[in-house]
Image: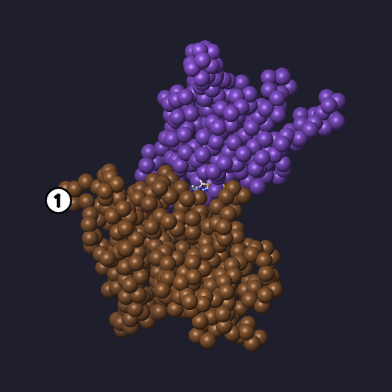
Amino acid sequence: MKSNTTRAVRIITGNQAAALAAKNAKVRVVAAYPITPATPVVEELSKMVETGEMKAHFILVESEHSAMAACIGASAAGSRTFTATSSHGLAYMHELLHYATNARTPVVMAVANRAIGPGWNIWADLSDSISQRDTGWMQFYCSDNQEIYDTIIMAYRIAEHRDVLLPAMVCYDGFVLSHTAMPIEITDVNDFIDEYHPVWRLDFDEPSTHGNILPPDYFMELRREVCEAHERALKVMKEVEREFYEYSGRLTPLILEEYRLEDADVAMVTMGAISSEAKIAVDELRKRGVKAGLLRLKAFRPFPKQEVVEKLGSVEKVYVFDRSVSPGFDGQLFSELKAVLWDLRSPPEVYGRIVGLGGRDVTSRVFEKAVLGELDKKWVMEVIY
Amino acid sequence: MMTGFGTPTTAQQAGQASNQDKLRELVKLPTTWCPGCGNGIILGAFLRACLKLVDNKELEMKNIVVVSGIGCSGRVTQFLKFSSVHSTHGRAIPLATGIKLANPELKVVVMMGDGDAFAIGGNHFIHAARRNIDLTAIIFNNSLYGMTGGQLSPTTQEGEKTPSSPFGNVERPFNISELAITAGATYVARWTTFHVKQLQKSIEDALSHRGFAVVEVITGCPTRTKKKPSELLKMQKNIRPLRVLKKVEDQEVEEFVSKYYRLVRELGKTGRR
Ligand SMILES: Cc1ncc(C[n+]2csc(CCOP(=O)(O)OP(=O)(O)O)c2C)c(N)n1
Ligand code: SF4
Ligand SMILES: [Mg+2]
C-alpha cells in the first residue's frame, strides 16, 4: 500500500460512487441522457463539472444513441470518456456499442441494471447488460458500492491498455446498489491513473480516416483482433487487480471472487448484488453440515473460462443463479457455465435457477432452499423469508 | 397496455347519463400524477372533446386509439378505459403510424412529452409532419423531463436552471409550433392549461382534421420546478402566441394514408400489383 495516498470513508450510494470514480479517474468528457435508476450519476457529474470540481466537458445530448456516439467521438479525439445508463437507454445504444468495440475506443460506462419493458419496470434485473453480451464490451458485475468505485477506476487502466483497447461496462443492480448508501473508502488515485495517453487518436499532424468499408478479405481479421484483445484483457486484469491492491490496500476482484469454496462439495455461482445473500446462505448451509461455497463472477466478458474450470473442477454440484433469462433457452450464465465445464473429464452436475427478475427480492433462503433440493424448478417465483 | 373499450351502461343506453358520468366511464381515477400537475387538465380537455364529437356523431369511441410515449405525460394511457398503447420513449409516432396504416378507419391520437417528441423522438415528429399522416399529436410541453427529475429538455428556455444545467441552460430551445408548421403539419394550435376552453375546442378541431394535427399544450410541473400550481397558471396566462397557427384543408395537401391507399388501388387496377 502506498503510504502517502489520502483516503476518506464516505457513506454514499452506488451512483455517487460511480460519479466520484469517473471524476477521480480524470474523465474529461461526459455525454449522457437521463434514465432511472442511472440518472443521479449524470446529475452528480454535471454538478461537479459546473462547479469546476471536475475538469471535464459535459455534453447534453438528445438520446442514449447520441450519448454513445458522442462518447466514441470524444474518445477518438483523444479524451477519456464516460457515460452512465440503464435498461432501455442501454438497449437504444446497441448499434453504437458495436461501433465502440470495432473502433477500439476505450470508453467506460456505468450501467445501473434494470429490467426491460414493456411491462414497465424500473427495478433490478441483469437483462439489459446481458443482452449486450455480444457487442464486444468488457462487462464487470459489482456486488457493493466499494466495488463500483474501484472497478470504474481500474476499468480505464484495462480498457486503455495497448494490448486491450476495448470499451468496458461496469454494471450494478439498480436501486439495490444504485440508490443504497454504504460506507466506502475513497482513495485518491492520482498516482494510480494518469491523464489519458491514447494509443491512437484522430491526429491533425497525421491525418487518417476511420470507419471505412472493410471487404471480406479483411473483416474477419478485425473481428479476430477484437476476440484476441478479450483474451489478452484477462491477463491485464490480473495485473491491474494486483497493482490496485498494492496501491490502495484493497483486493477488489476483477475476474472472480470465491467464498468458502476450497473444500466445498456444492458450489453456488452468482453475479451482482444477490451474491451477498448467497454468502449468508453459504454460512447457514455450513452450519447445517452442507459443505457449500460460492463463486461470484465479476467478469462476464471476457469470460474467465480457465479460472472457472479451476475453481469448480472438484465440486460435485453447481447451482447457477441468473437474474436474467434468454427466452427459448435458459439463464445465460447457466448456459455459459455448463459449456465451460463440459471440457472437464468428469464435470459436476450443474443446475440453473432463474431468480429476482424485475426487482423481485432474492433472499439468502432462496439459495439455501435451492441447495437443499427444496426448490427443484428452474423458475424461483416465490420470495422466501 | 391494451384495454378494450367497455360496453355502454344502461344509463347511457337510456340516454340519461350526465356528462360527468360519461367522463367517468372513460377514465380511471385517481391518476398517479402529482397534485397540481397540469397534465390532468389536458386529459380532461381531451376527453370532453372526444365526448362532444361522439355526441355529434362525428366520432365513435371504439374507433379511438391513444398511443403515448414514456414520461409523466406518457402515463396518460394507464388512466384511459379505452384502446391505448404505452409505447417506448420517443417511439410513439412510429408505433401510431403502424396502427394507422394497418387500419385507416381508426382515429389515432399520439400523446407525448416535450422530451419524448423533440429530444429522443424528434426525428419521427418532423417526418410525420412532412408526410402529413392523419394523426392527432398532443404535446404535453412542460419544458423539462418530468419523470426523470426535471432535467432540461429541448424546450427549456435559455438560462433556466435544472438538475442538468445547475448554472443555467446554455442551449436554445425549439419553438414546437413553428417547427410543426415548417415541417409540414396541416393543423397547428398552441394553448396552455390556463386556456381550457380554447384548448378543448382545438382538440376537437384537431380530431376532426384529416392530416397531421398538432396541439401544443404548455403545462406546468409544480413538483420539479418547485413552484405553486397557481403561480404556474399565472405565468401561462400571458404566454404568446396562443391560437390556431395553421390550418390547411385536405383538398390542398393530400393526407398520406389516403394517398397511399389510392396508389395501391390504382396499381391494383392496372394489374401491376
Ligand atoms: C430509451 C430511454 N431513455 C431514457 C428513458 C428515461 N426517461 C423516461 S421519461 C424521460 C423524459 C421524459 O420527459 P418528457 O418526454 O418531457 O415527459 P414528461 O415526464 O416531462 O411528461 C426519460 C429521459 C427511457 N425510458 N427510455
Ligand atoms: S413530476 Fe411534474 S410532470 Fe410529472 S406528474 Fe409530477 S407535476 Fe406532473
Ligand atoms: Mg416534459
Would residue A28 appear left or right of B217 to someone viewing this image? left
Residue visible at 62% across and 34% down in the picture: B66
Q: Nearer the viewer, residue A343 or A369?
A: A343
Determine the residue located farthest toward the left in the rendered image.
A205
Compare residues A123 and A33 and report the one nearer the observer: A123
User: Who is closer to the viewer here, A47 or A19?
Assistant: A19
Chain displayed in purple? B
**What chain is tagged by disc 1?**
A
Q: At which x and y percent is residue A219?
A: 30, 50
Kind of residue at disc 1? Glu
**Picture coordinates of residue B149 (x, y %)?**
51, 51
Q: Position of residue A7 (x, y in %)?
A: 37, 77
Q: Residue furthest front?
A: A345
Q: Is mark 1 within 8 Å of ligand 1?
A: no
Q: Do we see residue A254 in this rendering?
A: yes
Graded by Cα atoms within 10 Å as few (under 14), some (14 to 19) or many (20 or more), the crowding at tag 1 reads: few
Horizontal side of residue A346 vs A211, given as left or right:
right
Using the rendered view, name the quadrant where residue A364 is placed: bottom right
Disc 1 target residue? A206
Image check: A163 left or right of B248? left
Please name the residue shown 47% across and 24% down the image.
B131
- Residue visible at 47% across and 69% down? A340
Position of residue A112 relative to residue B195, above or below, is below
Give x and y (percent) for residue A109: 40, 59
Residue that appears at 57% across and 83% down: A265
**Is residue A71 visible in the rendered structure shown here?**
no
- The chain coloured brown is A
Instruction: Give the secondary structure at mark 1.
Output: loop
Image quadrant holding the N terminus of chain B, namely: top right
